[in-house]
Amino acid sequence: MEKRELIYEGKAKKLFTTDDANLLISEFKDDLTAFNGEKKSSEAGKGALNNKISTELFKLLAEDGIPTHFVKMLDDNHMLHKRTDVILIEVIVRNIATGSLSKNLGIKDGTVLPFTLVEFDYKNDALGDPKLNDQHALILGLVKYQDELDKLRRMAREINDILKPYFAAKGLNLVDFKLEFGKDSSGNIILIDEISPDNCRFWDMQSGEKMDKDRFRQGLGGLKMAYEEVLNRILSK
Ligand code: 5GP
């Protein structure tokens, strides 16, 4: 399967058509951005690490019954996946308070939440990805029906129920993560995008060390080593 036309370039990936109208290729870039594109850099090999990590996690989720867009990894930087109509909602799942939750609501960084929190952000760079409630999402027409929002929440919790113990067994706390969903050619809601240290927070259970994009956001250095460590732990049985 070969790349044809570039149809979209995002901050971390380029999207290409293929000779099959139902399939697209994502190219994982080495670019790093934070704070809605205000901070920029690049780290050679970051794209390949995210492609490999996402591939393993999409396979794991598919085995556990979560429908995803993943078809196969083509090479280090390329993933073949289904084409979907993207739902412009970022579904944020949180087990531990940090980041914008601590900032916005004053919950102490590192507080274990009494239950898993699922939030919606509007996927809209121009507006800075603002928080959405269900009525906002329906008024904006991001989905048609309330039960689609309920389904996004249900799927996000199911994904957390799979990934949280999976990473705990590998000595990593899954602190929070961002998911995206789309509708496939039959109208089914499936998981899309990527699952990687670019959109998940992982804290080492022993040292508390951050093993994700916060290393870049907070200028801590050692980003590539952290991503490699996440991949190595995923690949270790
Ligand atoms: P926060 O809202 O605390 O900044 O982020 C919560 C979680 O969602 C973090 O794991 C973060 O990586 C992820 N996340 C939220 N918004 C975005 C986004 O626009 N892009 C990416 N890559 N991740 C995001």
Image (tube, rainbow, N blue to C red):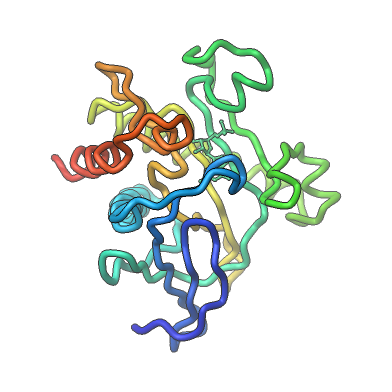
- Position of the C terminus by quadrant: top left
118 lies left or right of 79? right
User: Which image quarter: residue 48?
Assistant: bottom left
What residue is drawn where x is 63% and y is 21%? 103
Is residue 152 in view from this perspective?
A: no
Q: Quadrant of ligand 1?
A: top right
34 to 69, vertically: above or below: above
What residue is drawn where x is 26% and y is 64%? 76
Seen as rendered, the residue at the extreme right is 139
The percent position of residue 108, horizontal first and vertical second, equals 55, 10
Is residue 160 in view from this perspective?
A: yes
What residue is drawn where x is 45% and y is 63%? 69
What residue is drawn where x is 24% and y is 25%? 171
Q: How many marks?
A: 0
Seen as rendered, the residue at the extreme left is 237
The percent position of residue 72, horizontal first and vertical second, equals 32, 68
164 lies left or right of 107? left
144 to 186, vertically: above or below: above
Nearest to the observer: residue 150 or residue 100: 100
User: Which image quarter: residue 160?
Assistant: top left
59 lies left or right of 214? left
The percent position of residue 1, horizontal first and vertical second, equals 34, 83
The percent position of residue 168, horizontal first and vertical second, equals 29, 26
